[in-house]
Amino acid sequence: MKNIGFAAVAALLSVGAAHAEWAPDGPIKVLIGFKAGGGADSLARLLAEDIQAREGWNLIPVNVDGSGGAIMARELKDARPDGLTIGVGITDTFGYGLLAVRDPGYAADDFDFLATIAGTQIAVVAKADRGWQNLGDVIQDARNGKTISFGAMTPRLADGAYYIGKANDVDFSIVSNFSGGQDVLNAISAGDVDIGWVAGPQKAGVQSGDLVNLANGEDLPLEMSPDAQKLGDLGVDFHFGTTFLALAPADLPADAKAALSDAIIGAVEDPDSKVSTFIQRLFVPKTMGADAARDYVDAERQDAQNLLDATAE
Amino acid sequence: MGVLDYVLAGIVEALTGNPALALGPLILSWPVLMVVSGFLTGVLIGAVPGLSGPFAMAMALPILISAFGFSSDALLPVMGFLVGIMKGATLGGAVPAILFNIPGTPDAFMTTLDGYPMAQKGQSRKALRVAQFASVTGDSFSDLVLFVCAPFLAISIELFLGLSEKAALMILSLSFVAVVVGSDAFRGLLAVSLGLLVASVATGADAYPRLSLGSDVLAAGLPTIPVIIGLLVVSEILAGLAELRRDRHKARAHAPTPDDQSGLSWAERRALLPFIGVSMSLGTLIGALPGIGSTLAAALGYTAGRKMHKGPVPFGEGTPEGIASCEAANSAVSGANLIPALSLGIPGNISAVFLILAATSIGGFNPGPSVFRFTQDQVNPELVIAFGLFTLMVVANLLNWATGARFMEMLGGLIRVPRHILLPIVLLLTLTSVYVEGGAMMDVIILLIFGVAGCLMRWSGVPILPFVIAYILAAPLEMTIRNAFEASGADPWFLFHGFFSPACLVLAVAIIVFSGWLRAGRRAA
Amino acid sequence: MTVTTRWKDLGLGIFGIAAAGVILFVWIPADISTGVIDTWRRVTRIGDAMLPVFATIGILLSCMGIAANAALRRPGADWALLHAPMLLMAGAVLMVSLALMMLTGPVLAWVVMGPDQPYRILRDDMPWKYTGFLIGGTFLIAALQALVMRRLRWRSVGVGLLASVLIAMFYGLPFEDLLLPPNGDF
């Protein structure tokens, strides 16, 4: 605290001088858009620990889960843009999540994107003992009159599930209130839903043979199961992968934005950091700075518009 | 990982993970340090008349969260401290009950009936030994039941219950809590409904924060810790102060009678065992049901003991069996009432409320059936935490076995700080810790508003515990119902398929109607 | 059951029924954006109004039960004493002490350092960090004790100051970057 008081006095004295290196004048709240214990949550918490260790800042992670990250976005939007509140979420929330919801309560311009962190390994997952090899088998069962419930954690994935059904003439019962892929995975394990989207935490289960990736939701082959069925084979020309990113309320001062962005990318790209080890285990690394992150989100929103047009009645 | 690997991982995590002190190969871990300090704090607080375990937990929780932060390393130390308080307070409550005829905690009232007469006969040391022996035996038994039942129950629930069954079970628990807490089932139902209503403020799925009255403060959602501490603790302090003002000249504690320093022989201990056995089984059973507290357990244990007793000194005139019956029963509640909390995520009583609050505030541990997934290939960190918590409970019990009696004897002189000095200090400490934890003035104001609301509830006889349990359970209940509805393909009768859910719902309605309407009619007649 | 308890129960029941009516027919429709059941983009879901509607129906039914039991002279629960004057006085004490905590620091700084010094910078440093808390905390403890004892004793002030210092040390020493309440937190 004393050094921060000192920093503040120094900042006052050096008015007009070159801007000093930005440092937070208090603990940084990290709002996590997904439920505790899941992939996004672990990612954000490890990132916070790494930044704390590397920069000496104090970071406090808080789970603000629900509606595919939208709840976090709404809370973050109203925070003061002083670098003391940042969010960790997914690009989905600022692409599809903005377009498909009646009134999202936030817009892409409400935020300054700081960096992208990692890409998902999303797949449609089921328990292996259900006997399905791929999503085609599930669709076959559904055509034969079996009710299939399909878990999803964001509106986009819910629409994706709908579109997969539509393209194959079946109706899934889509369960869309999960707050994270881990939540869906728990529901699959407990038999609460038959199949569902999971974006990386399924890896160990797939490798041990308890779970099976029925179909690949990414545009590239999955690292854990490169041969999983492609959605293209089922007449679906979209992909549903998403990217984890860090963001802050709009109008963050430039020095704070640069310092936060550098701190995040530095931690993620450090091969010895906890977060990079974690990403290697479940996801794929994907770092982009502030400007590239915004372009990426904008491009993803365009893709989302196309999916929306395709799923419109 | 197999089951044993998980148990082992939990033990290792609790005993050596997160070391606070290391002397060569000897490691004192933060979790162990915290469960020990929690236990000692609990005995002390429980021994002070007017303070109780929930008080200590409420004051400690925000402080602990500020101190240990939000990493998953914080879970075991924080929950360990809370568990330690829970165990210590039950033990400590017996000290003033025996020495001064003042129950330190409400569940120690029955202990005064035989404890104080024994102390008057100069047998206070023996009485304390009996209380400690019965308490620690009951507590250890109840913990064993918890260790076995919680994983088993959780796994069966995951196997056999779908979403709509889980929702129906939560509704049944709420209705059960409404009926068993307080004397009027309708007031219990009112408390549950109010809890659900307050929990709905600003928590919906839609962008517009529901029921927020256009206020920015409400739109951000009510902070859980201030709401609950306000209702439970601030209202208790305010009511206590008001009572003290009314009867200023309440009788002071008498000086204790000189003691003959008699101990408790092994033969005497063995003679107590049948009483302890019956009482601890009753206590464990009651503890496993949501909403029924240790006070009722103590009363039932005491009644059962009186029926069994054939000794020379009758119950109520200073017999060790009386103390043992009561203390074994109220201590056996504490372990068992974590069964619904850990296996279902349903907080059955105040200690479970604070444990769940700690887990959800820190993150990384979501009490509920998914904790007990024995994943083979990949470590389920929540399960390791659960076994770590069990280990800490064993550590607290061992400490209790070894030092509990001596510690109780030491407390005699410490517990005569008058309440009118204590309560304002506790209030300031509560305000401070809530502010420090949330970092916002609004949290303190919400704390005080709910403190006043708690006073109004106490006034009108509306019980607070069902409100708090409903408030905590609202979010999981709503989420489960939403998912169950969608999984059924928007079937309006989604809660009425099969046997289990309709049975739960019918039972839920039936116990309210029976207890609120028919029983009131019979009492009037 | 006594006559007053019966009238109080009846009052509680009727008040609850009226409140439930207002919540159900005015507050919920006006202040929730989706209904009990919500259909949006071809998916039918449970809307945001479901939980509050059922909670309010619970309030309505329980209050009808309370009122009906009272009307039929059947026993409900016991009413405790409200202690309204004490509650009001304690509330006033709390408000004054929170105001002291918030304002003492800024006002003192304004007097000592002049009006140009922004308090946000000072509030982390000695002695400003503790002035408000110590004065407000001492007042809180001493005044509540005085309310209970019906007279103010210097001993209470001493106890209050001592307790406030201890609590301030308890938080101030181990956690350097914590702010004690609620020092100039506007």
Image (cartoon, coloured by chain):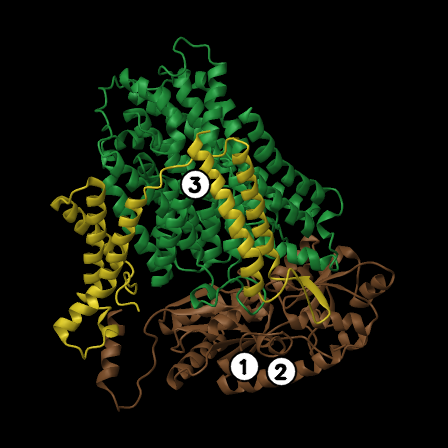
Report the amino acid beneath label 2.
Arg
In front: A273, or A75? A75
What residue did someone put label 3 on? B460
Tag 1 subunit: A
Residue B40 to residue C22: above or below:
above
Q: Position of residue B417 (x, y in %)?
A: 23, 37
Tag 2 subunit: A
| SS class, disc 2 | helix
Residue pictured at 67% horizontal, 82% vertical: A305
Colour yellow maps to chain: C
Q: Nearer the viewer, mark 3 or mark 2?
A: 3
Q: Colour of chain A?
A: brown
CB atoms of marks 1 and 2 within 8 Å: yes
What residue did someone put label 1 on? A108
Q: Colour of chain B?
A: green
Q: Position of residue B304 (x, y in %)?
A: 50, 20
What residue did someone put label 2 on? A301
Is residue B272 visible in the rendered image? The answer is: yes
The CA span between labels 1 and 3 is: 50 Å
